Amino acid sequence: MSKIGIFFGGKDNGSTAKVARKIQELLGDEASIHNVASAAKTDVEKYDFLVLGTAAWGIGEMHSDWERFIDTMVEADLAEKKIGLFGLGDQKIYPESFVDGMGTIFCRLPHKENVIGYTSTRGYHFYYSTAEKDGKFVGLAIDDDTQKEFTDERVKNWVKQIREEAGI
Ligand SMILES: Cc1cc2nc3c(=O)[nH]c(=O)nc-3n(C[C@H](O)[C@H](O)[C@H](O)COP(=O)(O)O)c2cc1C
């Protein structure tokens, strides 16, 4: 059974899905991928390690499928599960709410101490993000709209980091 569940919200051909698939490729056979549009609480319960991703929408919202799924997800017992977050956004058009969807998922988690994979904000240019805590992003921030050239390297570095932090 796979130990790692990657849950993303968004279209299957969107940038968030693309990043989810890259993460899965790098994590290998132990990782399964779910679109939250069709995921259930039992899917969440199967895994020891959850990777949760969303783009930012509206004024710093998660993808609408996450808005529906997050209450179901937090009904599962997350106390012993490690969690990694990734968020997509556009820092040029939305510099005051950059990757805020990731900040919203973080804010809704009952066990924030289980979140691993914080990353540096260096190299990004924005004014404000709810995904920034104590000078770091609470996960992997991807701007595939204006910094596409960094996406692969950022994903690769982050997967290496979470593997080390989670011991997987
Ligand atoms: C209506 C709309 C609102 C958006 N709001 C934000 C935002 O508040 N913050 C941000 O960083 N990006 C925002 N974005 C940019 C998207 O998050 C970004 O384009 C993302 O890569 C889309 O992912 P997807 O292809 O999986 O849908 C917005 C985009 C649209 C179209």
Image (tube, helix red, strand yellow):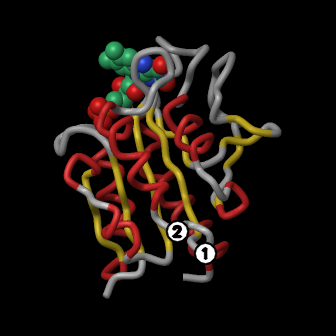
- The quadrant of the picture occupied by the C terminus is bottom right
- 165 left or right of 36 in image: right
Query: Residue 149 at x, y = what percent?
Result: 42, 38
**Which residue, given by chain and number where applicable, does mark 2 sit on?**
77
Residue 48 seen in render: yes
Measured in 3D between alpha carbons, the distance from the residue under mark 1 to the one under mark 2, in whole angstroms, is: 8 Å
Q: Is mark 1 within 8 Å of ligand 1?
A: no
Q: Does 16 appear above or below 4?
A: above
**Mark 2 packing: few (<14 Cα in 10 Å), some, or many (20+)?**
few
Q: Does 165 appear above or below 87?
A: below
- 38 left or right of 72 in image: left
- The quadrant of the picture occupied by the N terminus is bottom left
Query: Residue 28 at x, y = what percent?
Result: 34, 77
Q: Residue at x 68, y 52 (%)?
A: 118
- Point out the residue furthest to the bottom here: 1
Looking at the picture, tell me which residue is in the foreground, 44 or 75.
75
Residue 145 seen in render: no
* Amino acid, disc 1: Glu
Residue 12, quarter of picture:
top left
Query: Residue 125 at x, y = what percent?
Result: 64, 22
* Amino acid, disc 2: Asp
Residue 54, quarter of picture:
top left
Looking at the picture, tell me which residue is in the foreground, 158 or 152.
158
**Which residue, given by chain and number where applicable, does mark 1 sit on?**
80
Looking at the picture, tell me which residue is in the foreground, 146 or 9.
9
Callout 1 touching callout 2 (CB < 8 Å): yes
